[in-house]
Image: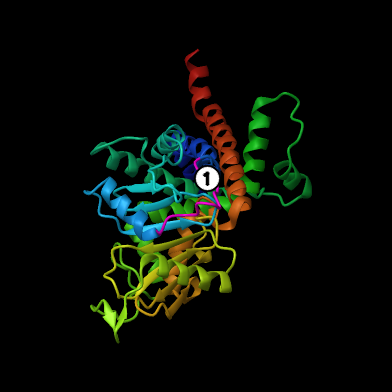
């Protein structure tokens, strides 16, 4: 009786959300290597290293970045370790300015065409690429479909096991087999094979997506560890700060001096590094919170923060990823576990293959549902 109820619930969820899940699976495949493709395109804008002229001081580049768009309130500077990489000044999510490190000229970064393509695909994946008030509706539909997909995957694991536990029955559901041109038998076989081999990764991929859609799922991540949900945009509070630009007669360090101290520290402790990010809105002389990205940009476990004294350049505090609370660490990882990026290219490849398996699994499931529910009705009418 329980198996029957579970089966029909599994089938009903598949029929209701099947096309939406199919769309999210296809777009998931297309987004698999987004980070690598955009990074590859970005490298085309790197300047040829000129050892004769060298690079301009960061303080001068900051002045030019501010002069290029006075209305843009710059908040941070990111220095990429790649030779000739542009210096990126950002204003939170409101925009950015990229400068050639040797000439100070504004340079184009990335590829507008590729970025627009991936932006469209991501919009489809998350909310059917709708805008305005309709976006909330689209998000509600994809969120509900994602929850139904989680139920489909979990219930499918149980339903995969045959009623009779015989090796022949398991073998028929575990491996692809020759079905002799019988489309129904082929769909049944493919549905079970793709389903069981992708089930465990799918549980993680689909469950982590729920955290993005629902506040209760996000809160649950912290509640598991007995922590309160942090406010939006909050971060661990660094050590004490000072409002004075000078201390004991010493002048506050320049942006170049702060970067030099930070790069020296990371090269001594965590070489190689990928990106160093420093704030540019911190009052002179105040402690500076520096972020080192030692991974691929999607691996929070490879990020490290240090607090530099704004006057002496000494390390006041070192905050590796492990120093964060369990809830914060888990929430940070969940963001990139969904895409597989937290595990690097191997994780992304696995996520892409699982998304591709979902395409076949959903398609064959809908085909089986059609034969079970619709075909009998059509045959009766004929």
Q: Residue furthest top?
A: 382
Queried whether the magenta region covers residue 56, the answer comes back as yes
Queried whether the magenta region covers residue 185, the answer comes back as no
Q: Element at badge 1? A: helix
159 displayed left or right of 67: right
Q: Residue furthest bottom?
A: 248
What residue do we see at 40% from left, 56% from top? 211
For disc 1, the marked residue is 39
Mark 1, Cα crowd under 10 Å, few <14 / some 14-19 / many 20+, is some
Q: Nearer the viewer, residue 95 or 169?
A: 95
Q: Give the range drawn in magenta.
A: 45-57
Q: Which of 106 and 197 is in front in this view?
A: 106
33 displayed left or right of 329: right
Where residue 247 appears, as percent x and y from the top left, is 29, 83
Q: Taking the image as drawn, is residue 154 in sight?
A: no
Picture quarter containing residue 29? Answer: top right
Where residue 57 appears, as percent x and y from the top left, is 41, 59
Where residue 170 appears, as percent x and y from the top left, is 73, 47
186 displayed left or right of 63: right
Q: In this view, does 187 lie above or below 330?
A: above
Q: Which residue lies furthest to the front in this view?
A: 52
Q: Taking the image as drawn, is residue 64 in sight?
A: yes
Q: Is residue 287 above or below residue 73?
A: below
What colouring style does the render use? rainbow
What residue do we see at 56% from left, 69% from top? 267
Where residue 69 appears, as percent x and y from the top left, is 26, 46
């Amino acid at each position: 009786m329980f198996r029957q109820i579970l089966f029909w619930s599994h089938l009903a969820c598949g029929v209701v959300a099947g096309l939406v899940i199919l769309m999210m699976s296809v777009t998931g495949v297309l987004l698999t290597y987004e980070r690598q493709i955009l990074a590859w395109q970005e490298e085309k804008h790197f300047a040829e290293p000129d050892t004769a002229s060298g690079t301009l001081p960061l303080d001068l580049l900051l002045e030019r970045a501010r002069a290029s768009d006075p209305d843009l309130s710059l908040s941070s500077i990111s220095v990429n370790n790649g030779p000739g990489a542009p210096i990126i000044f950002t204003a939170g999510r409101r925009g950015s300015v990229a400068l050639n490190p040797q000439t100070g000229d504004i340079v184009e970064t990335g590829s507008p065409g590729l970025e627009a393509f991936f932006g469209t695909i991501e919009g489809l994946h998350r909310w059917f690429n709708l805008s305005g008030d309709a976006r909330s509706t689209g998000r509600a539909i994809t969120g509900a479909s994602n929850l139904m997909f989680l139920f489909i995957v979990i219930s499918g694991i149980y339903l995969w096991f045959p009623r009779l536990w015989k090796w022949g029955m398991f073998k028929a559901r575990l491996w692809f087999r020759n079905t002799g041109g019988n489309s129904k038998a082929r769909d049944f076989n493919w549905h079970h094979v793709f389903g069981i081999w992708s089930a465990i990764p799918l549980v993680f991929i689909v469950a982590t997506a729920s955290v993005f859609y629902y506040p209760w799922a996000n809160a649950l991540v912290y509640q598991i560890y007995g922590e309160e949900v942090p406010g939006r945009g909050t971060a661990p509070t660094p050590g004490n700060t000072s409002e004075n630009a000078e201390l004991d007669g010493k002048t506050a360090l320049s942006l170049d001096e702060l970067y030099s101290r930070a790069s020296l520290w990371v090269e001594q402790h965590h070489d190689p590094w990928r990106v160093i990010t420093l704030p540019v809105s911190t009052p002179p002389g105040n402690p500076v919170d520096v972020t080192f990205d030692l991974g691929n940009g999607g691996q929070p476990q490879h990020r490290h923060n240090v607090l530099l004294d704004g006057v002496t350049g000494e390390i006041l505090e070192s905050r590796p990823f492990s120093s964060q609370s369990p809830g914060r660490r888990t929430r940070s990882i969940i963001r990139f576990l969904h895409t597989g990026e937290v595990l690097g290219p191997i994780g992304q490849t696995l996520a892409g293959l699982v998304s591709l398996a979902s395409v076949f699994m959903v398609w064959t499931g809908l085909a089986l549902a059609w034969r079970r529910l619709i075909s009998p009705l059509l045959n009766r009418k004929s």
